[in-house]
C-alpha cells in the first residue's frame, strides 16, 4: 500500500500539543517529519505521565501522551536563540513542503521565521501557523493554551456546567487535538491548491476559532439573536429523552432522542411503563417538554431499578439511540473500538505499547503510526548531514550552544 504523503517533507518548530499533534498526523500519512525542539526538550515531555503516575521514570517508562503527539518523527535539538540556529531551520525549510509552527508573533519575528521570509526562500512552501487568537489584531502576541483560548474565550466554558453553578474545566488536550485536525485539514487542502497553482500557501489556525466552530450551532444562532443560551439542566432538561440517567449500580447512560414522537412508544416499552402511553399530556414532544419537571424524575426512578448491564438489552431491543457513559478502562477494551482498528502498537526503546491509531482510515492506503517519538535531538547529526553540513560545521554549531 502507498502512504498518501510519501515524499512530503515537513519541518516542525512547535511544542506542547496542538501543532505537534498535527505534524504527527502528517507523519501517520507518510510524511518525513523533522521535529525541532529546544535542547532542554519539548515542554510537553513527561508532564501528564508524571502527574498520573508518581513512580514514572522517563528512562524506563513510556511517556504515552508525548508519544501520541510526536510519533513517527525525527528529532533535532536546536536552540533558536543561538547564532546560526535560524539559518539551519531555513536550510531545512528550503527543501521542505510544509512548515508547522506555534511560535508566538514576537518569537517568529525574533528568529526571522515568518511566512514572508520562508516562502521567499521556498515559494512552494505550505506555511502552517497555529496561534491562540490570530496573527493579526490586538491579541496576536498573547500566549494561549486550549484551556484559555479554545475552552474559555471561545465561549464553550460558559455553556458547560449546571445552571447557576461554576463553569466546568476541560480535559488536557481536548481543544488541542480538535485544533490539530483543523491544521491537518488546512495543510492537506493547501497541498492540493499547490498542485493546482504551483504556489505555496499560508494556513492559519487558531485555538479560539476552532473552539467557536465546535459550538457552531450556538454561535451561529447568537450571531443573529445576540443572546447567551442557557446551560443544559440535567434535572429539568428541555427534553427528558435527551438526558443522562443513573442506573442501580451507580453507572450512567445517555438517552439521545432529540426530536419527533416515534421514540415515545418504544421508550415506554423498554422502561416497562406502558401506562405512560395513556397519558395524553405526554403524547407529543411538546407535551413531554412542558411536563419535564414531572417526567424526568419519573424516568430517573425507573432507571434506578436496574443495573447498566440489565438495561442494555432492553434499550437495544427497541433500537433506541443511547449510550453508556463509558469509563476509560471500558473504552480501551471496547470490542467496537477493537473492530474499527482504533488502537495501534508501537515498538519503542521502552518496549511495545498500545496507542491511539490515526483517527480516520483510508481504504487501501498506508496510514498509521510509523514509529516512536524521537528522543530529544536523536537525529540531529543525521538531519544536518543530509542538509550538507560538514562535521566541522556541526561541531561549530554545537560549540556555540545551538545544538543539544
Image: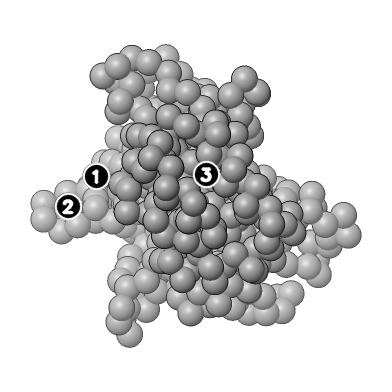
Q: Which mark is residue 21?
A: none
Residue 81 appears in view:
no
Q: Are marks 1 and 2 in contact (CB under 8 Å)?
A: yes
Q: Nearer the viewer, mark 1 or mark 3?
A: 3
For disc 2, the neighbor class at 10 Å (few under 14, some 14 to 19, many from 20) is some
Q: Residues under labels 2 and 3: Cα distance?
A: 44 Å
Q: Which residue corresponds to the image point at 65% horizontal and 47% vertical from the top-left?
A: 301
Q: Which residue corresponds to the image point at 74% horizontal and 59% vertical from the top-left?
A: 249
Q: Which residue corresponds to the image point at 49% horizontal and 51% vertical from the top-left?
A: 275
Q: Which residue is mark 2?
A: 193
Q: Are marks 2 and 3 in contact (CB under 8 Å)?
A: no
Q: Which mark is residue 201?
A: 1
Q: Which residue is mark 3?
A: 243
Q: Which residue corresponds to the image point at 40% horizontal and 36% vertical from the top-left?
A: 281
Residue 380's quadrant in the figure? bottom right
Residue 82's quadrant in the figure? top right
Residue 104, horizontal then vertical, whole percent: 49, 31
Q: Residues under labels 1 and 3: Cα distance?
A: 45 Å
Q: Does residue 71 lie above or below 108 as drawn?
A: below
Position of residue 162 in the picture relative to residue 86 (left or right): right
Q: Quadrant of the C terminus?
A: bottom right
- Closer to the chain start, of discs 1 and 2, is 2
Q: Are marks 1 and 3 in contact (CB under 8 Å)?
A: no
Amino acid at each position: 500500500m502507498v502512504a498518501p504523503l510519501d515524499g512530503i517533507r515537513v519541518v516542525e518548530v512547535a511544542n506542547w500539543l496542538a501543532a505537534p499533534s498535527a505534524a504527527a498526523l502528517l507523519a501517520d500519512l507518510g510524511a518525513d517529519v523533522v521535529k525541532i525542539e529546544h535542547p532542554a526538550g519539548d515542554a510537553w515531555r513527561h508532564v501528564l505521565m508524571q502527574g498520573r503516575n508518581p513512580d514514572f521514570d522517563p528512562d524506563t517508562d513510556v511517556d504515552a501522551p508525548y508519544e501520541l503527539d510526536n510519533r513517527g518523527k525525527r528529532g533535532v535539538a536546536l536552540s533558536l536563540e543561538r547564532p546560526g540556529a535560524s539559518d539551519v531551520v531555513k536550510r531545512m525549510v528550503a527543501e521542505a513542503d510544509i512548515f508547522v509552527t506555534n511560535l508566538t508573533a514576537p518569537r517568529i519575528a525574533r528568529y526571522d521565521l515568518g511566512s514572508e521570509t520562508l516562502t521567499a526562500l521556498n515559494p512552494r512552501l505550505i506555511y502552517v501557523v497555529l496561534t491562540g487568537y490570530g496573527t493579526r489584531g490586538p491579541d496576536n502576541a498573547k500566549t494561549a493554551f486550549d484551556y484559555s483560548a479554545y475552552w474559555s474565550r471561545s465561549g464553550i466554558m460558559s455553556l458547560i456546567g449546571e445552571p447557576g453553578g461554576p463553569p466546568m474545566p476541560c480535559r488536557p488536550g481536548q481543544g488541542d487535538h480538535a485544533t490539530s485536525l483543523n491544521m491537518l485539514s488546512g495543510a492537506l487542502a493547501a497541498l492540493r491548491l499547490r498542485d493546482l497553482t504551483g504556489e505555496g500557501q499560508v494556513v492559519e489556525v487558531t485555538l479560539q476559532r476552532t473552539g467557536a466552530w465546535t459550538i457552531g450551532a450556538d454561535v451561529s444562532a447568537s450571531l443573529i439573536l445576540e443572546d447567551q443560551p442557557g446551560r443544559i439542566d440535567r434535572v429539568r432538561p428541555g427534553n427528558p429523552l435527551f438526558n443522562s440517567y443513573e442506573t442501580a449500580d451507580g453507572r450512567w447512560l445517555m438517552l439521545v432522542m432529540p426530536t419527533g414522537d416515534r421514540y415515545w412508544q418504544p421508550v415506554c416499552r423498554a422502561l416497562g411503563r406502558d401506562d405512560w402511553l395513556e397519558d395524553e399530556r405526554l403524547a407529543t414532544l411538546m407535551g413531554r417538554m412542558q411536563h419535564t419537571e414531572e417526567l424526568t424524575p419519573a424516568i430517573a426512578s425507573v432507571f434506578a431499578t436496574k443495573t447498566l448491564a440489565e438495561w442494555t438489552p432492553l434499550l437495544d431491543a427497541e433500537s433506541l439511540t443511547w449510550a453508556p457513559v463509558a469509563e476509560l478502562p471500558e473504552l480501551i477494551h471496547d470490542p467496537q473500538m477493537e473492530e474499527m482498528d482504533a488502537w495501534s502498537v508501537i515498538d519503542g526503546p521502552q518496549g511495545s505499547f498500545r496507542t491511539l491509531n490515526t483517527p480516520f482510515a483510508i481504504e487501501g492506503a498506508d496510514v498509521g503510526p510509523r514509529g516512536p517519538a524521537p528522543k530529544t535531538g536523536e537525529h540531529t547529526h543525521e538531519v544536518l548531514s543530509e542538509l550538507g553540513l560538514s562535521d566541522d560545521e556541526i561541531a561549530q554549531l554545537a560549540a556555540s550552544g545551538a545544538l543539544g
